[in-house]
Image (cartoon, rainbow, N blue to C red):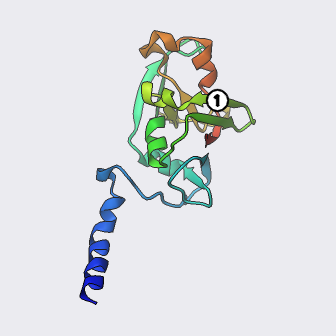
Amino acid sequence: MAIHLIKKWIRWMFLPLLFSPSVGVQALEIPRQTPVLTLTGLIGVTNQTGAAVFDMAMLEALPQHEFTTLTPWEDRPLKFSGPLLRDVLRLVQARGQTLRATALNDYRISIPADDAQQFDVIIATRLNDQPMSIRTRGPLFIIYPFNAHPQLQSARYYERSIWQLKAIHIE
């Protein structure tokens, strides 16, 4: 009987550490606002049946990164900010090799999961420090740091930069 109580006490004391950001794993809260991103497929952490769903506040609560880069869609450098794609994938414990990204208009593109590890790809929530509207390619935009790596300045990576992102299916 005493061993059972000790085991219960240990779980009660140390279970929160398993979901502490300092350990690298977090519990995924339930969105309180309108969801803007849904991840499905080969993921280990969910907050809805079979999916990890994020509202904007959840994405903006993650560590934020920024870079300024030229894009093929504008004639001036733009500043993008948001969480790293690899941080979002790590949070949901994604284990696939391919990310099937879908936009609000149902445009779809496959992105190798390795891109998120090799480059500082972000899920931009802001453009020039302002939230992005659908009209300005928002509310989410997977964007590569084109100016940081010459090999990113090609149609292959431009196509993978999907704006108006709504979902990622991990395979």
**106 above or below 154?**
below
Instruction: From the top left corner, tell me how far across and down residue 52 is, in percent.
Output: 56, 53
Seen from the viewer's position, the closer of residues 165 and 75 is 165
- Quick check: can you spot residue 83? no
Seen from the viewer's position, the closer of residues 54 and 100 is 100
Give the residue displayed 51% in from the left and 53% down from the top.
44
**154 above or below 29?**
above
Q: Residues within 10 Å of mark 1 (few under 14, many from 20)?
A: some
In the image: residue 125, left or right of residue 133: left
Give the residue displayed 29% in from the left and 77% down from the top.
7
Which element type, helix, strand or loop, lies under badge 1? Answer: strand
- Quadrant in which the N terminus is drawn: bottom left
Seen from the viewer's position, the closer of residues 75 and 121 is 121
In the image: residue 147, left or right of residue 40: left
- Quadrant in which the C terminus is drawn: top right
In the image: residue 130, left or right of residue 67: right
Give the residue displayed 54% in from the left and 49% down from the top.
43
Q: How many marks?
A: 1
Give the residue displayed 53% in from the left and 61% down from the top.
30
Task: Say what amino acid the circle numbered 1 marks.
Answer: Ser
- Quick check: can you spot residue 101? yes
User: Which image quadrant is residue 112 in?
Assistant: top right
Residue designated by label 1: 110
Instruction: From the top left corner, tell me how far across and down residue 117 is, in percent.
Output: 44, 30
Instruction: From the top left corner, tell me how far across and down residue 67 is, in percent.
Output: 42, 24
Instruction: From the top left corner, tell me how far across and down residue 126 is, in percent.
Output: 51, 34
User: Which image quadrant is residue 12 in?
Assistant: bottom left
In the image: residue 131, left or right of residue 164: left
